[in-house]
Image: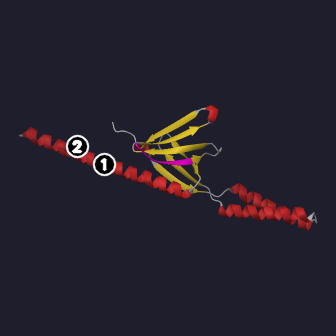
Amino acid sequence: MSEEIKLGNLAVSDQNGNSSELLLTNLRVYQRQESKIFGKQETVIPYQAITTVRIGWQRLWWVLALGIIGLVVSIATYIYHIDAAVQYSSLVIGIGMLLLFWFYKPSEVLIMAPTASIGGTPKNHDDVRKFCDLLLSVMEGRAEGSKIEEQTAANKKEASETEWRL
């Protein structure tokens, strides 16, 4: 069996904020999660089992809701002549949340297999692109290598059959 060589890694975090690492080797993909004193978890997916690699981004709906609430509070304080400080602060918070909603788009990566999936939210979308491009190039190289091996095995089988018939 060949030796495992590290090809790349990607730092990600899950929905709870726990950090983990996606590790790409020449044989498989790992996700290592450490929960400090609570334990350690490692998920392994071999290349042959990978069915889907998904990269995406999604805006946060709750930021939009907070922005709208801030604007509604600002309008209500204007209508009912409540303190100007409350009015302007809720206006600034509302506009700030709407700007945050528009410009902050966290990305995510998900590598799926029939029995498991690994992934998370990385810090940088460009790092995800590089990692997934490397993963897909390794998978394509392995697929081409397996096709070549199948062809050589078929050629050897045909050669042995022709020799046997003589």
User: Which residue is disc 2 drawn over?
Assistant: 153
Residue 157, given in percent of the width and then of the height, sits at 18, 41
Which comes before the other along the chain, label 1 or label 2?
Answer: 1
* 85 in relation to 9, above or below: below
Magenta segment boundaries in residue numbering: 5-11
Q: Is residue 36 left or right of residue 163?
A: right
10 is within the stretch colored magenta: yes
Cβ atoms at labels 1 and 2 below 8 Å apart: no
Q: Secondary structure at mark 1?
A: helix
* 37 in relation to 135, above or below: above
Residue 25, given in percent of the width and then of the height, sits at 43, 44
- Name the quadrant of the C terminus: top left
The residue carrying pointer 1 sits among few (fewer than 14), some (14 to 19) or many (20 or more) residues within 10 Å by Cα, namely: few
Mark 1 and mark 2: Cα distance apart in space: 12 Å
Q: Is residue 149 left or right of residue 82?
A: left
Task: Name the amino acid type tagged 1.
Answer: Gly
Task: Name the amino acid type tagged 2.
Answer: Ala
User: Which residue is disc 1 drawn over?
Assistant: 145
The quadrant in which residue 92 appears is: bottom right
